[in-house]
Amino acid sequence: MKVVSSSEMREIDRYTIQELGIPGIVLMENAAMSVVSETISTIRESRKVVICCGIGNNGGDGLAIGRILSCNHINVSIAVIGDSNKIKGDAKINYDVAKKLNIDIHEYNSQEEMNDFVTLVNGCDVIYDAIFGTGLSREVTDRYYEAIDAINHTNAYKIAVDIPSGINADDGHVLGIAVDADKTVTFCLPKLGLLLYPGASNVGELVVGDIGIPYVSVERIKSNTSIMDDNLAKHFMPNRVKMSHKGTYGKVLIIAGTKKMTGAAVLTSSAAYRTGAGLVKTFIEESVSSIITSSLPEAIIETYNRDDDNLSFEDKSKLLEMLLWADTIAIGPGLGNDSITKEILEVVINNFNKNIVIDADGINALSKDIHVLKNKKGNIIVTPHLGEMSRLTNMDIERISNNTVEVAQVFSKQHKVICVLKSARTVISSPNGMTNINIYGNPGMATAGSGDVLTGIIVSLLGQGLDVFDAAILGTYIHSKAGDRAKESVGEHGLLANDIIDSIPYVIKSSLSE
């Protein structure tokens, strides 16, 4: 599904109204109806509903919602915040109709009147927020700040119309203050600011409402940003065919694990198998290789000696032979932050002409000499978390965290790699500017080994033939959905990386059967 900026959504609206000739008042009515249909079951038993409206088109949506609810015998009051004399166009039509229907309308156009507003919202069960729409770009101040603060301090169920008021629709930044919604019904397509933190914390349950905008209006917008939804995932899933064998589903080489972090190799290899890889070979230092075989009997083991500062001639030759064997490679989880890791990484990048996933210590090694990417023979996916991205880019973590989409896009384009920037909203970006935002997952997944599992999933999908960008998107989706399934079983506090692995087959099975 496409994700749009506020300007892209305005162009969709403009084309629909001015070029196709669908009146704006029709879209406003459809928007109001979509909100009502998505929320009527929630408010049916409410004693009192308050619609908080601004004086723009978002307020016009709210006025139409108030009329529809009132006509369905729901006790509604409308609070107009701002000078009602400035309401224009389609919003003015809905304001005048509400007046003629004698709907209970209160107007708050000064600081002095805000005490009455507080009393009104404190006495209701449900609040609809239609104060500001997606066009807001300035700090919220004065009576609008007080109104949003009062809404947030009520115990009412809060429903945001299109976007919680106070959220920047383009980057998710909170413009001083924002409504903390329980549910948001947005129109036509998701907006970037609904998906990115900190704004995403204010959205609650997100629903995309159909307001009758024709497909042709949406297709004109060449948005480079998307989200993976449950319906789309099944089309990305690799197929299994009856006439096949283990080699059909990929020969995956995983270079991971040391004495201190053997578990990383086990987790990555296990995740690769659970995602459907046919053969997984793990390259690990000889002294701990038995841990792999005891934990994962299906794994094939190749070993090397890590006692010196460099690979021996024999071990380097062995690695080069494995590069000829493998269909795809993952390198880095638990591999150690030393000269041998850097040497192995360089051998792989300089000689392997297929798909590579670089994670963890592989990224740390890469950050010491980012220019090695210029020598790459194949396609590369890097999967940094915020700290690793800081080391790769020499940017501070806060700057990256506040600009994840932009940072991932710039890095991907600059180094011609797929970038999977891991955070609360993981961003997947390709060199051509295409970007996907993952909207699944939970805080319980912030646990040791979770990133190793993601690497195993992605490299497995590559081995099964997926394109690098598709594998990165689908792999992140499977990982997050598996984490959500694990959360249902064990909760967030006790969730382990192995719980995510155990859930992978069920997520894939569910996606394929839908």
Image (spheres, rainbow, N blue to C red):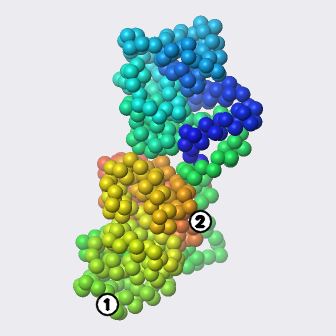
Which residue is at 40% across, 56% downward? 422
Drawn side of residue 98 relative to residue 484, left or right: right
Q: Is residue 309 above or below residue 360?
A: below
Where residue 71 appears, as percent x and y from the top left, is 63, 14
The answer to which image quadrant residue 190 occupies is top right
* Residue ID for mark 1: 312
Label 2 or label 1, whichever comes before in sequence order: 2
The amino acid type found where label 1 is placed reads: Ser
Where residue 12 appears, as percent x and y from the top left, is 65, 39
Q: In terms of depth relative to the viewer, which is nearer, 8 or 105? A: 8
Where residue 239 appears, as percent x and y from the top left, is 61, 66
Q: Secondary structure at mark 2?
A: loop
Q: Is residue 79 above or below residue 339?
A: above
Q: Is residue 248 above or below residue 140?
A: below
Which residue is at 61% across, 26% downward? 32
Q: Is residue 72 visible?
A: no
Drawn side of residue 449 relative to residue 405, left or right: left
Label ID, residue 238? 2
Q: In terms of depth relative to the viewer, which is nearer, 461 or 505? A: 461
Q: Is residue 176 above or below residue 437?
A: above
Q: Is residue 22 visible?
A: yes
The amino acid type found where label 2 is placed reads: Pro
